[in-house]
Image (cartoon, helix red, strand yellow):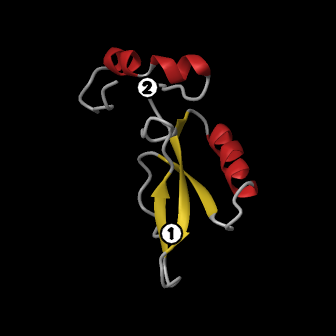
């Protein structure tokens, strides 16, 4: 499977990700998407570093709606035995300095 390239047409993108979409893990809509970011403390615990959550094929895990992303974010936080925090970000929003 080729990696997603923003220079591809919508049809090209749809051809690249049929399996995950069919299984319901991921569906790409041409437009706004949401991602989940895990906030990980650095080794000195002085600063939090943002880490983008990936799917099982090392692609960015994206959601069509904020509600879907928030539901998954909550699942990640509930299941985090290390106490990591997660946040949802709309693709294309400016950086909010965490």
> Mark 1 highlights which residue?
98
Which residue occupies 31% across, 17% down?
Answer: 12
Which residue occupies 43% across, 22% down?
Answer: 17
Q: Earlier in the sequence, mark 2 or mark 1?
A: 2
Asked if residue 72 is positioned above or below residue 95 in the image, the reply reads above
Asked if residue 15 is positioned above or below residue 67 in the image, the reply reads above
The residue at the far left in this view is: 7
Q: Foreground residue, 60 or 92?
A: 60
Question: Left or right: where does residue 76 sit relative to residue 31?
Answer: right
Q: Which x, y percent locates residue 95?
A: 42, 61
Q: Foreground residue, 26 or 65?
A: 26
Q: Are marks 2 and 1 in contact (CB under 8 Å)?
A: no
Q: Quadrant of residue 39?
A: bottom right
Local crowd at mark 2 within 10 Å, few (<14), some, or many (≥20)?
Answer: few
Q: Which mark is residue 30?
A: 2
Q: Which mark is residue 75?
A: none
User: Mark 2 and mark 1: span between their CA atoms?
Assistant: 27 Å
Asked if residue 65 is positioned above or below residue 30 in the image, the reply reads below
Q: Which x, y percent locates residue 87?
A: 60, 57
Count of numbered labels shown in the rendering: 2
Q: Quadrant of the N terminus?
A: top left
Local crowd at mark 1 within 10 Å, few (<14), some, or many (≥20)?
Answer: few
Which residue occupies 69% across, 67% down?
Answer: 83
Q: Foreground residue, 29 or 80?
A: 80
Q: Secondary structure at mark 1?
A: loop
Question: Left or right: where does residue 54 sit relative to residue 76?
Answer: left
Q: Secondary structure at mark 2?
A: loop
């Amino acid at each position: 499977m080729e990696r997603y390239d923003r220079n591809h047409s919508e049809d090209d993108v749809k051809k690249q990700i049929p399996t995950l979409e069919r299984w319901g893990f991921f569906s790409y809509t041409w437009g706004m998407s949401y991602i989940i970011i895990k906030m990980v403390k650095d080794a000195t615990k002085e600063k939090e570093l943002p880490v983008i959550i990936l799917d099982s094929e090392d692609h960015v895990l994206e959601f069509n709606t904020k509600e879907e992303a928030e539901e998954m974010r909550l699942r990640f936080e509930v299941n985090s035995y290390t106490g990591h925090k997660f946040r949802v970000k709309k693709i294309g929003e400016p950086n909010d300095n965490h």
